[in-house]
Amino acid sequence: MKVLASLASGSAALLCLAACASQEVAPASPQARAGAYAVPVLPTLPASVVDAPISYALAPLRAALEQSVPRRFGNLEQRHRVGGNARRLVAFTATRTPFRVTFADGRATLEATVSYQARGWYRPVIGPTVSASCGTGDSMPRITVRLVSDVALSRTWQLGTTTRLVSAQPTTDTKRDQCTVTFLDIDVTDHVIRALEGAVRQRLPGVDRKLARVDVKARVARWFGLLQRNIRVTDSLWLQINPDRVGLGQVSLIDSALVAEVRLTAHPRLVTGPAPVPTANPLPPLGRPIGEVGDSARLHIEGLLGYPEASAALQRELAGRRFSRFGRAVRLEQVRLYPLADGRVVLAVRVVGGVRGEVFLVGTPQLDTATRTLTVPDLDFDVATSDALVAGVAWLKKADLVAQLRQSARFPLDTLLEETRRRVEQSLNRDLTEGVRLSGAVRTGRLVDAIVHPLWLIVRAEAAGTLALDVDRPLRRR
């Protein structure tokens, strides 16, 4: 009996040792599900509107007029018949001031003041020729000449002006600005005005031809091409502006220059990975005005969370944690996160203690928009790990390990997206070339989705802001 009791006691001790011994597990690594993984298609955002003000100094228009319209008219030695009457003659000399320019409603108004002297002669049938003059003193009579030039860009990007004389009349209705030789009954004022109008009208077509040689299309085509280049945000993140339609907004006068608000639509986007092939679309024809509100940007931005960084964050939080059930315990020694090619992630956890080895949990990352975090709410042991744990260590499945790992696998997104937003905004504010600067501001809005990429967990969010071009180089003539 003592022998039997001793054998029974020994067997119980062996069973206890066996039960208390650490058990090795080595499940196979999870495999991606069969079938191609389709990246979710982003919702279409409204087109961005980019204002690109092109300044055109009014100096060339004024210079063309100054060159074409003489500063001095007439000659006091050159007599002209009055109304075809050979007995009544007049001569005049006139000097104009430089043109003054104003602009309103798409139209430039140019004014100059002409001061003049005149002399009249009358040759009677009998007797000597008599004469009289006006404007020989300090107060010369004046005529105000007013021109109007309509400025427009054609669909083919041709700058065109139509300049015409709208009035030439005495500057005031006082005697100061009248030149009538009373006793000869000769109104020299009207004669000077008619001569002045003829001289100006004859030269205006040449003014418009000079201005038509200003090369607008080449200039716009250049910065339209610059907008199609890739903009590097990081080594693995690229911004594309993708401009398409171009329209003309308002034309105004700012600091003595005409400013044409060229407005274009664009579809900016961020591209993750290698540099994408840039677009190379030609400059489209100038279209109708685009909207009433410009300078707005809408795009999707992407926050990139690398798997090493995510693993390090989990390691800091979970390493050393202990979990127990039914008197058995394990300690987490190492945690790492990596992707599967089916839109899921794997959490590999190395445990020591009652179970030794590496176990695997899988799940699909999702966005928690309320807390603006990335979570894996369905994280659970994969099939191979579950099968391995059934063989003697099923207790581990009943511990709160899974619940704790689900709770810990949460990644705040605001800091991640803010870093992307800052980098995108920094990339937007740059000189595309001398005299052409891209500027913009971005603010992050609604979270859209999360993608399991081979290199990163990608979090996509909508962003809004402003996008504009500052074009300040002078126009060049062909």
Image (cartoon, grey):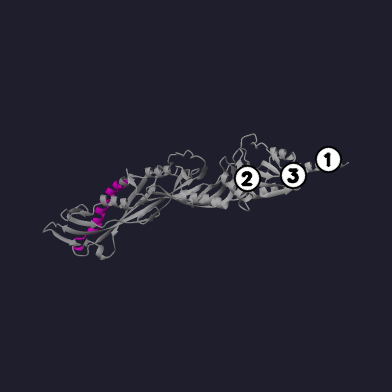
Q: Can residue 282 be seen from the camera position used here?
A: yes
Residue 291: image location, x then y, percent: 49, 50
Point out the stretch of residues depicted in magenta: 182-208
> How many residues crowd around disc 3 within 10 Å: few (fewer than 14), some, or many (20 or more)?
some
Q: Nearer the viewer, mark 3 or mark 1?
A: 1
Name, please, the residue furthest toward the right.
Answer: 1
Q: Residue 460 lies in magenta, yes or no?
A: no
Which SS does the magenta portion mostly show?
helix
Does residue 143 appear left or right of residue 226 in this picture?
left
Residue 7, quarter of the rendered image: top right
Residue 267: image location, x then y, percent: 50, 45
* Residue underneath mark 2: 334
Residue 271: image location, x then y, percent: 52, 42
Does residue 66 appear left or right of residue 1 in this picture?
left
Q: Can residue 43 be seen from the camera position used here?
A: no
Q: Secondary structure at mark 2?
A: strand
Residue 15, quarter of the rendered image: top right
* Residue underneath mark 3: 20
**Is 405 placed above or below 123 here?**
above
Q: Nearer the viewer, mark 2 or mark 3?
A: 3
Residue 360: image location, x then y, percent: 66, 41
Q: Residue 205 lies in magenta, yes or no?
A: yes
How many numbered marks have been drawn onto this rendered protein structure? 3
* Residue underneath mark 1: 7
